[in-house]
Image: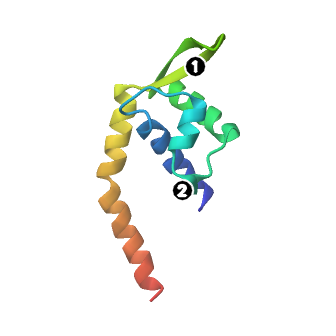
Protein backbone atom coordinates (compact mmCIF):
# COMPACT_ATOMS: atom_id res chain seq x y z
CA UNK A 1 0.00 0.00 0.00
CA UNK A 2 1.26 3.49 -0.85
CA UNK A 3 2.83 5.21 2.19
CA UNK A 4 0.75 8.42 1.89
CA UNK A 5 -2.48 6.45 1.54
CA UNK A 6 -1.45 4.23 4.44
CA UNK A 7 -0.74 7.28 6.64
CA UNK A 8 -4.28 8.59 6.24
CA UNK A 9 -5.75 5.19 6.98
CA UNK A 10 -3.53 4.69 10.03
CA UNK A 11 -4.54 7.98 11.64
CA UNK A 12 -8.22 7.35 11.05
CA UNK A 13 -8.06 3.70 12.17
CA UNK A 14 -6.20 4.68 15.36
CA UNK A 15 -8.95 7.18 16.15
CA UNK A 16 -11.66 4.65 15.25
CA UNK A 17 -10.12 2.07 17.57
CA UNK A 18 -10.97 4.37 20.49
CA UNK A 19 -14.46 5.49 19.52
CA UNK A 20 -16.17 3.24 22.06
CA UNK A 21 -13.46 2.78 24.68
CA UNK A 22 -10.18 4.30 25.80
CA UNK A 23 -7.07 2.34 24.88
CA UNK A 24 -3.29 2.13 25.19
CA UNK A 25 -0.53 1.56 22.65
CA UNK A 26 -0.25 -2.23 22.59
CA UNK A 27 -4.04 -2.66 22.49
CA UNK A 28 -4.36 -0.19 19.61
CA UNK A 29 -1.75 -2.12 17.61
CA UNK A 30 -3.74 -5.33 18.13
CA UNK A 31 -7.05 -3.72 17.06
CA UNK A 32 -5.97 -1.88 13.90
CA UNK A 33 -6.25 -3.99 10.70
CA UNK A 34 -3.10 -6.06 10.02
CA UNK A 35 -2.91 -4.74 6.44
CA UNK A 36 -1.67 -1.43 7.85
CA UNK A 37 1.34 -3.15 9.43
CA UNK A 38 1.20 -0.85 12.47
CA UNK A 39 4.26 -1.04 14.73
CA UNK A 40 5.18 0.80 17.91
CA UNK A 41 7.65 2.96 16.01
CA UNK A 42 4.82 4.06 13.70
CA UNK A 43 2.07 4.29 16.31
CA UNK A 44 3.60 6.59 18.91
CA UNK A 45 4.42 9.47 16.51
CA UNK A 46 0.86 9.15 15.14
CA UNK A 47 -0.58 9.32 18.66
CA UNK A 48 1.52 12.39 19.42
CA UNK A 49 0.42 14.08 16.17
CA UNK A 50 -3.24 13.34 16.91
CA UNK A 51 -2.87 14.62 20.47
CA UNK A 52 -1.25 17.88 19.32
CA UNK A 53 -4.06 18.27 16.75
CA UNK A 54 -6.64 17.96 19.55
CA UNK A 55 -8.06 14.68 18.24
CA UNK A 56 -6.92 12.65 21.26
CA UNK A 57 -6.58 13.26 24.96
CA UNK A 58 -4.46 11.23 27.37
CA UNK A 59 -4.35 10.17 30.99
CA UNK A 60 -2.27 7.68 32.96
CA UNK A 61 -3.33 4.80 35.21
CA UNK A 62 -1.14 2.59 37.35
CA UNK A 63 -1.03 -0.97 36.04
CA UNK A 64 1.17 -3.64 37.66
CA UNK A 65 3.20 -0.98 39.45
CA UNK A 66 3.83 1.11 36.32
CA UNK A 67 1.99 4.00 34.74
CA UNK A 68 0.15 3.11 31.55
CA UNK A 69 -0.80 5.94 29.22
CA UNK A 70 -4.36 5.74 27.91
CA UNK A 71 -5.74 7.57 24.91
CA UNK A 72 -9.27 8.82 24.32
CA UNK A 73 -10.78 10.13 21.08
CA UNK A 74 -12.00 13.72 21.51
CA UNK A 75 -15.02 15.25 19.78
CA UNK A 76 -12.63 16.60 17.12
CA UNK A 77 -11.22 13.07 16.63
CA UNK A 78 -14.71 11.60 16.34
CA UNK A 79 -15.54 14.27 13.74
CA UNK A 80 -12.41 13.26 11.78
CA UNK A 81 -13.63 9.64 11.62
CA UNK A 82 -17.18 10.68 10.69
CA UNK A 83 -15.86 12.95 7.92
CA UNK A 84 -13.57 10.20 6.59
CA UNK A 85 -16.44 7.71 6.45
CA UNK A 86 -18.74 10.24 4.78
CA UNK A 87 -16.07 10.85 2.11
CA UNK A 88 -15.85 7.13 1.38
CA UNK A 89 -18.31 7.24 -1.54
CA UNK A 90 -16.03 9.76 -3.26
CA UNK A 91 -13.01 7.52 -2.63
CA UNK A 92 -14.82 4.51 -4.11
CA UNK A 93 -15.79 6.59 -7.14
CA UNK A 94 -12.14 7.48 -7.80
CA UNK A 95 -11.12 3.84 -7.29
CA UNK A 96 -13.74 2.63 -9.77
CA UNK A 97 -12.54 5.22 -12.32
CA UNK A 98 -8.94 3.99 -12.03
CA UNK A 99 -10.01 0.34 -12.13
CA UNK A 100 -11.91 0.88 -15.40
CA UNK A 101 -8.69 2.15 -16.99
CA UNK A 102 -7.10 -1.25 -16.36
CA UNK A 103 -9.83 -3.24 -18.09
Label of residue 48 in the image: none
Q: Position of residue 6 (x, y in %)?
A: 56, 53
Q: Quadrant of residue 35?
A: bottom right
- The residue beneath circle 1 is 69
- The residue beneath circle 2 is 5
Residue at (48%, 85%) from the top-left corner? 102
Q: Name the foreground residue: 62 vs 74.
A: 62
Residue at (44%, 38%) from the top-left corner? 17
Instruction: Determine whether the residue tagged by mark 1 lies in a helix, strand or loop.
Output: strand
Tell me the CA gap for discs 1 and 2.
28 Å
Q: Quadrant of residue 99?
A: bottom left
- In the rendered structure, are the residues bearing label 1 and label 2 in contact, judged by CB atoms less than 8 Å apart? no
| Quadrant position of the N terminus in the picture | bottom right
Q: Give the mark, 1 or 2, whose residue is nearer the N terminus.
A: 2
Query: How many residues crowd around disc 1 within 10 Å: few (fewer than 14), some, or many (20 or more)?
Result: some
Residue at (62%, 46%) from the top-left corner? 38
Rendered position, 95 above or below 60: below
Q: Position of residue 32 (x, y in %)?
A: 51, 45
Q: Is residue 87 left or right of residue 36?
A: left
In this view, the mark in front (1 or 2): 1
Instruction: Determine whether the residue tagged by mark 2 lies in a helix, strand or loop.
Output: helix
Q: Is residue 97 left or right of residue 13?
A: left
Residue at (33%, 50%) from the top-left corner? 85
Q: Position of residue 42 (x, y in %)?
A: 66, 41
Q: Is residue 42 left or right of residue 85?
A: right
Q: Quadrant of residue 74?
A: top left
| Quadrant position of the C terminus in the picture | bottom left
Rendered position, 20 above or below 91: above
Judge whether residue 43 can be spotted in this image: yes
Q: Name the foreground residue: 48 vs 69.
A: 69
Judge whether residue 54 can be spotted in this image: no
Amino acid sequence: MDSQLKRGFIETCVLASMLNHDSYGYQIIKEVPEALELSESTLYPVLKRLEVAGKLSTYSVEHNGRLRKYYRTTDEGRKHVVDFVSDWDDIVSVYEYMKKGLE
